[in-house]
Amino acid sequence: MPELSSPPAPTALIVEDDPAIGELLELGFGYEGFTTVRARSGGEALEQFARARPDVIILDLGLSGLDGSVVLRAVRERGETPVLVLTARDGVDERINHLQAGADDYLVKPFVFGELMARVRAVLRRSQPQSSHVLQYADLQLDAHLREARRAGRVLELSPRALEVLETFLRYPQRVLSKTALLDSVWGAGFMGDDNIVEVYVRQLRRTLGSPELLHTVRGSGYVLRLREPESS
């Protein structure tokens, strides 16, 4: 089985001067499969923007040096990188002014991380047309760049590792994949653990995908992604 050639993880530039919130965002985005770059001031934000070429920017407004509003204007002058403003400024005028200035979304602190991530994925979907990184079989779809899976339009709640397993099946639909092939593609050829870990993730995927069943066991051979139950060997 050929080695997977996955698209690079999206990069999020996190512009936040509060250490606790910044660390929370870095950990959360990292868990969701993003590469993160951190900036703690307006000047550093523009430096990192030029250096890292991020896919999305999470921007606080109350920064030392250059205010977040100045950063937003500078980013907009240089391109269309999505910007989600994350700030304690909750006035209606603030929202209107920053959205009109080019922000793609505006979320007020305190916030729920799940909502923030949903908004980030939404602005990324709007900014990036579908391409080869969107994998689909039947009504199941995975955006390998955004690390988001849907079935019949329903977002699937999956761990990063489960998404990697699902991506492997979607790259080889209707093809029987052995435990060894799945381990090599997802965990790496040097994995020394119990190969029953594959069964654990396949069961998780079956529960999450729902009906009609798409993942089937082929006795003695492995697993296959297909619409109808295959004949067992």
Image: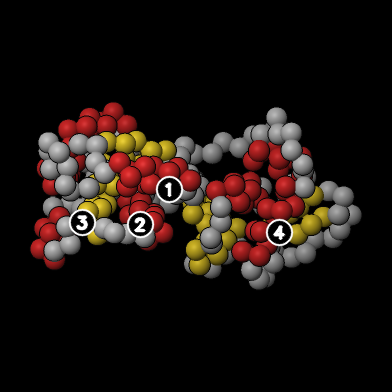
Q: Position of residue 198 (x, y in %)?
A: 72, 48
Inter-mark Cα distance, 4 to 1: 25 Å
Residue for badge 2: 116
Cβ–Cβ under 8 Å for marks 2 and 4: no
Disc 1 crowd rating (10 Å Cα; few below 14, some 14-19, many 20+) is some
The residue depicted at 15 percent of the width and 55 percent of the height is 98
Q: Nearer the viewer, mark 2 or mark 1?
A: 1
x and y percent of residue 131 in the render? 45, 48
Q: Nearer the viewer, residue 90 or 152?
A: 90
- Which disc number belongs to residue 203? 4
Q: Looking at the picture, which amino acid does disc 2 mark?
A: Leu
Decide which of tag 2 and tag 1 comes sooner along the chain: 1
Which disc number belongs to residue 88? 3
Gap in angstroms between the C-alphas marked 2 and 1: 10 Å
**Distance from the alpha carbon under mark 3 to that under mark 1:** 19 Å
- Which callout, 2 or 3, points at the residue further toward the start of the chain? 3
What's under tag 4, amino acid-wise? Arg
Disc 2 from disc 3: Cα separation: 14 Å
